[in-house]
């Protein structure tokens, strides 16, 4: 039996084109070498499951969504058409590093910002990772189009050294003036024990609490967020697997469309046919 877990159930779409960055903590890089990449199959699956009412958010990720602007616009056009037919509008978010675009692609992208309703962008800017091939200036165009901007930074290692502390403080000091909120995210590979999700003993949380005002936390069975400074800065921890088994019940917290168009019940497999998912959760 399948039950929906968190109330903001997301349909996450992995675009069928890769990212040029080589972040060591990326958990999906290997998939782009093994899957048969197909935009037509991704769109076909999307069209079959989009109108499931349980989906509150649609997230486009990758790979790098802005790595192929023409294909991204084709995907956005499909979502826009499905939004108009759906019973209830779904929030639309895009995860990106904002790679530098050609003049022609930049023009197309800015036109797309104005044509389609995109609720927000989650922009990767990891401390210690070289993003010189990325474009911060496009963030201003995103803001002008009314999109919410979140900057994400994955924390893979934390020894609490003075250099690490300074890097985090400098990061916050810079980005707090350029985005709506900052999300530090614990490396999924290091958060496999669910008992660690709710604990405030995490050394990174303890460090943030030395100079930021703690506001509280929220979460579900598979993730947790600790909030600081009126929720503008938070620390996210999530399990690598999001399908929870409780007796004969599978508790669903994520649904994923892979780059080959196959549909999965979490980030680590558990493939399901679109029709069977619709029958199970509607």
Image (cartoon, rainbow, N blue to C red):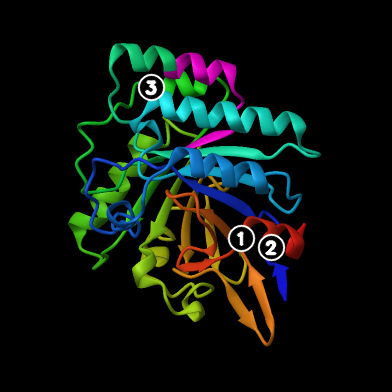
Q: Nearer the viewer, residue 159 or 153?
A: 153
Q: Nearer the viewer, residue 74 or 162?
A: 74
Task: Classify residue 101 as left or right of residue 52.
Answer: left
Q: In the picture, residue 160 is in which quadrant?
A: bottom left
Q: Which mark is residue 276?
A: 2
The x and y percentages for residue 249 are 69, 80
Task: Classify residue 241 as left or right of residue 22.
Answer: right
Task: Classify residue 252 as left or right of residue 25.
Answer: right
Residue 214 visible within the image: no
In the rendered image, the quadrant that contains the N terminus is bottom right
- Which residue range is magenta in the image? 109-121
Residue 133 visible within the image: yes
Q: Secondary structure at mark 2?
A: helix
Q: In the picture, residue 97 is in which quadrant?
A: top left
Total marks shown come to 3
Q: Nearer the viewer, residue 265 or 229?
A: 265
User: Which residue is rendered at x = 48% and y = 70% of the image?
Assistant: 241
Q: Nearer the viewer, residue 7 or 270?
A: 270
Q: In the picture, residue 173 is in which quadrant?
A: top left
The x and y percentages for residue 164 are 23, 56
Q: Label 3 to label 1, Cα distance in Å?
A: 38 Å
Q: Label 3 to label 2, Cα distance in Å?
A: 40 Å
| Residue linked to disc 3 | 138
User: Which residue is rendered at x = 33% and y = 32% of the image?
Assistant: 67
Q: Which mark is residue 273?
A: 1
The x and y percentages for residue 70 are 41, 23
Mark 2: few, some, or many residues within 10 Å (few <14, many ≥20)? Answer: few
């Amino acid at each position: 039996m399948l039950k929906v877990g968190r109330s903001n159930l997301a349909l996450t779409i992995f675009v069928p084109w890769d990212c040029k960055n080589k972040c060591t903590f990326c958990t999906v890089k290997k998939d782009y070498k093994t899957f048969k990449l197909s935009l037509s199959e991704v769109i076909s699956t999307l069209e079959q499951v989009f109108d499931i009412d349980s989906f509150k958010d649609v997230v486009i990720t990758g790979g790098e969504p802005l790595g192929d602007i023409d294909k991204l616009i084709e995907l956005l056009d499909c979502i826009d058409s499905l939004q108009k037919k759906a019973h209830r509008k779904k929030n639309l978010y895009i995860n990106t590093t904002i790679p530098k675009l050609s003049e022609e692609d930049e023009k197309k992208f800015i036109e797309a910002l104005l044509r389609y309703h995109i609720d927000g962008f989650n922009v990767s800017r990891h401390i210690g990772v070289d993003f010189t091939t990325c474009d911060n200036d496009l963030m201003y165009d995103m803001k002008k189009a009314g999109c919410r901007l979140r900057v994400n930074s994955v924390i893979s290692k934390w020894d609490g050294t003075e250099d690490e502390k300074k890097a985090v403080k400098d990061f916050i000091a810079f980005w707090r003036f350029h985005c709506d909120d900052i999300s530090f995210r614990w490396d999924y590979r290091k958060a496999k024990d669910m008992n660690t999700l709710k604990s405030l003993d995490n050394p990174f949380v303890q460090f943030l609490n030395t100079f930021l005002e703690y506001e509280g936390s929220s979460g579900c069975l598979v993730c947790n967020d600790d909030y600081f400074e009126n929720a503008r800065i938070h620390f996210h921890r999530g399990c690598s697997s999001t399908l929870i088994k409780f007796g004969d019940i599978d508790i669903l917290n994520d649904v994923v469309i892979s780059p080959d168009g196959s549909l999965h019940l979490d980030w680590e497999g558990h493939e399901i046919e679109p029709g069977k998912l619709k029958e199970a959760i509607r």
